[in-house]
Image (cartoon, rainbow, N blue to C red):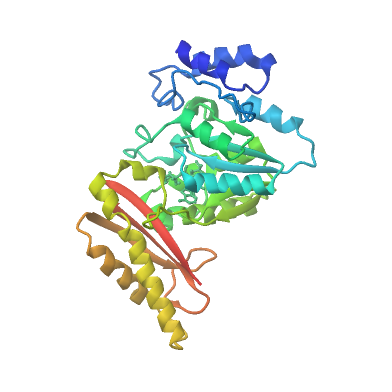
Amino acid sequence: MLKSVEMYQRLTISSPSKLRPLISQSIKIYTVDSPINQATQGMPQTYAMSSDTNASRPTIHPTIQSIRSMRKSLDSSKSVGFVPTMGALHEGHLSLARAARAQNDVVVASIFVNPTQFLQGEDLDKYPRQLEKDVELLRGVGVDHVFVPAADSMYRKNHVSYVDPVGFDDTKEGSFRPGHFRGVATIVTKLFNIVQPTNAYFGQKDATQCVLIRRITEDLDMDVNVQIMDTVREQDGLAMSSRNAYLTADEREKAPVLYKALCAAREVYESRLARGLKELEANDLREVVEEVLKTEPLIKEVQYVAIDDLEQMQPLEKVGSGGCIISLACKLGAVRLIDNIVLQ
Ligand SMILES: Nc1ncnc2c1ncn2[C@@H]1O[C@H](COP(=O)(O)OP(=O)(O)OP(=O)(O)O)[C@@H](O)[C@H]1O
Ligand SMILES: CC(C)(CO)[C@@H](O)C(=O)[O-]
Ligand code: BAL
């Protein structure tokens, strides 16, 4: 425990005058055996500051109070780009941070494994945590501030989702994770209220989440510009995801079949349109995807292959030149993976 205090002393703390309360809070919050303590898991024993010129960046904010006072101290003319994450960062996350860096005066990222978006029996406890490495990666792309709250500082006693985006449990993704999007809507609303970003960056990989975020910002009149960035893939086509770390070597080798299946549907769509066909049956595209997925015995379950419109992700029967999004969720061994492709 003392070691984690040491870590906070070595990281850039938001305000030296607040050092004492932060330290005592880190003792209180980051107890090793708290079930909802996300910050200590995978937390480095010590955090050595590098000696480069960026060493003072990013500033780590372990409390709401600290990130709020940073935000209040900014000149109102400054734009703030925000990248919310659950950590275990990869190039997908970093692409969002780079876009935020290029388009804003100040860049804030958050790392928070949000308990309310995990269903009972999901992987909350084993979700990968690597705070030290994540901070280094964010430093590398020029992020200025990282908000890393403890779970019990974001929620009162019970972990309850109080923002209810009606209808999202009925989406294809939501129906396999009932309550998940309430958790996401709640935490994103809270994070937006705390950080008050000008622009916020999300990845297309989580397509239903993108629709959800646009919906809540509109419905709740949030003054935030939501930017959706392309899915970053491994060289073999697999969409980057923190959960890819759960795959065995064999599963990892076979995992690009998801993207291959989506690409096969794209070929059919493009060739039919090129031959002058005005529209095609959504079911035909779905079958193409399913056929390719069937070729891989390690795929234990295809939860859905959905052909939806691009704006609201509502099911389509026919796909014309306006295009569609094809999204899918599969279990490869025991690991649930999602992916999607936009046809336009
Ligand atoms: N491959 C990717 N390309 C672009 N953005 C991504 C990619 N993967 C995740 N993101 C985006 O990064 C943000 C944070 O996502 P998160 O921390 O859940 O990572 P993740 O890799 O999606 O994790 P998980 O495996 O839990 O789904 C989200 O907006 C998400 O859409
Ligand atoms: C947006 C988010 C950070 C909210 O916890 C999470 O759902 C994610 O990482 O995609
Ligand atoms: N990127 C989505 C977060 C989740 O699956 O909970």
**189 left or right, relative to 335:** right
Rendered view: 287 above or below 184 = below
The quarter of the picture where the N terminus appears is top left
Q: Position of residue 324 (x, y in %)?
A: 47, 70
Q: Is residue 125 above or below residue 218?
A: above
Q: In the drawing, does residue 121 fall left or right of residue 93? A: left
| Residue drawn at 46 percent across, 43 percent down | 90
At 80% from the left and 42% from the top, the residue drawn is 77
Pick whichever, 96 or 331, lies toward us: 96
Residue 153 position within the rendered picture, expressed as x and y whole percent measured from the top left: 54, 25
Residue 67, horizontal then vertical, whole percent: 65, 29
Residue at 26 percent across and 69 percent down: it is 291
Residue sticking out furthest to the bottom: 276
Vertical side of 158 occupied by 260: above or below? below
Residue 163 showing in the rendered view: no
Closest to the observer: 34 or 80? 80
Q: Is residue 66 above or below residue 138?
A: above
In the visual, does 118 lie left or right of 203? left
Q: Is residue 23 visible?
A: yes
Residue 319, horizontal then vertical, whole percent: 45, 77
Q: How many marks?
A: 0
| Residue 60 in which image quadrant | top right
